[in-house]
Structure formats: C-alpha cells, structure tokens
Amino acid sequence: MRTTFSSRRRSRWAWLAVWVLPVLAGCNAPAPELSPEVLYMYHNNLGPMCLEMKAWLNETVIPSYPNLIIEEHLLSDFNAWGTLNALTAQYDQSQGPSSSFQYMPAVFYQGHAYSGFDESVKSELSSLIEQAQTSSD
C-alpha cells in the first residue's frame, strides 16, 4: 500500500491531537487547594518506588489509621500531569530521593512535598501521619 503525503500529514496531525494537545492543555491547570488532612499521591502505578509506597500504605498505614484520606492520581490521566506540574511549581524543591521532583511517586501532605519513596520519606510521613491523626482524635 502506498502512503501519500497527505495521509502522512493527517496521521501526524491525528497524533498531535490525540497525544500532545491534551498534555499541553493540562500544563496550564491551576494548582488545586490542598487540604492538610489529605495525603495526595501522584504516581504511575508501575515503578518500584510507586509500588513500594502503595504496599506500605495498604499494609501499614491504612490499617493503623483508617480515617486517613489518601487521594491517588495516576499519571496515565492527562489532567493529573497538569495538576502535578502546577503543584510542583509551588515548591522550591521536594524532599526524598529527588529534590527536583524527578522521581515518582510525588506526595503532598501537611505542607510537605516528596519525590520518590525511601526509608527517609517513610519515616517522615509516618511521623506526620501519626501527629495529624492523633491531634484530630
């Protein structure tokens, strides 16, 4: 089958419309107002740090603090990317394995921003969650 110039051009525009434009549209999303009672987690549901944090939340945190509100945002959703970009612009740097939001998950809780998941993030989040949950009881 012979591909003509006009059909190739149409396929490029279709690719642009389907993949690039929604991402660009989400880049200008306003940053949402974050509630200090909610743990916000932006992740891809694939990487080792994302999976490790999800396991820690499900196996340790949720059983201990069932009233903790966790809001997950999958980065396969174009709107999540725009919101994440707006949130990261509000912080000079992140805490954790990356100080510049280069690793997932990106977590926002109690005015803190984390990028990546390791023992230091686990320890800090554990302390913040414990303080917040005991003060709300």
Image (tube, grey):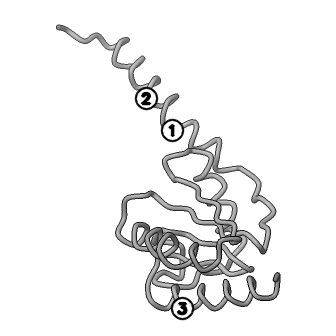
Residue in view at x 68 percent, y 76 percent: 109
Q: Amino acid at mark 2?
A: Trp
Q: Is residue 97 left or right of residue 88?
A: left
Q: Identify the mark at residue 88; answer none if there is no mark.
A: none
Q: How busy is the neighbourhood of tag 1: few (under 14 within 10 Å), some, or many (20 plus)? A: few
- The reply to whether dot 2 and dot 1 touch (C-beta < 8 Å) is yes
The one nearer the camera, 10 or 115, is 115
Q: Is residue 116 left or right of residue 69?
A: left
Residue in view at x 52 percent, y 86 percent: 121
Task: Estimate the spatial distance between the alpha carbons at disc 3 and disc 1, rounded to whole Å.
Answer: 38 Å
Q: Amino acid at mark 3?
A: Ser
Say what secondary structure mark 2 lies in: helix
Is 9 drawn above or below residue 91 in the view shown?
above
Sequence-wise, the earlier of marks 2 and 1 is 2
Residue 112: x percent and y percent?
68, 81
Sequence-wise, the earlier of marks 3 and 2 is 2
Residue in view at x 63 percent, y 91 percent: 127
The one nearer the camera, 50 or 19, is 50
Q: Amino acid at mark 1?
A: Val
Is 89 drawn above or below residue 28 in the view shown?
below
What residue sits right under mark 1 in the picture?
20
In this view, the mark in front (3 or 1): 3
Sequence-wise, the earlier of marks 3 and 1 is 1
The one nearer the camera, 9 or 103, is 103
Q: How busy is the neighbourhood of tag 2: few (under 14 within 10 Å), some, or many (20 plus)? A: few
Quadrant in the rendering for residue 49: bottom left
What residue sits right under mark 2 in the picture?
15
What residue sits right under mark 3 in the picture?
123
Task: Estimate the spatial distance between the alpha carbons at disc 2 and disc 1, rounded to whole Å.
Answer: 7 Å
Residue 47: x percent and y percent?
36, 64
Say what secondary structure mark 3 lies in: helix
Say what secondary structure mark 1 lies in: helix
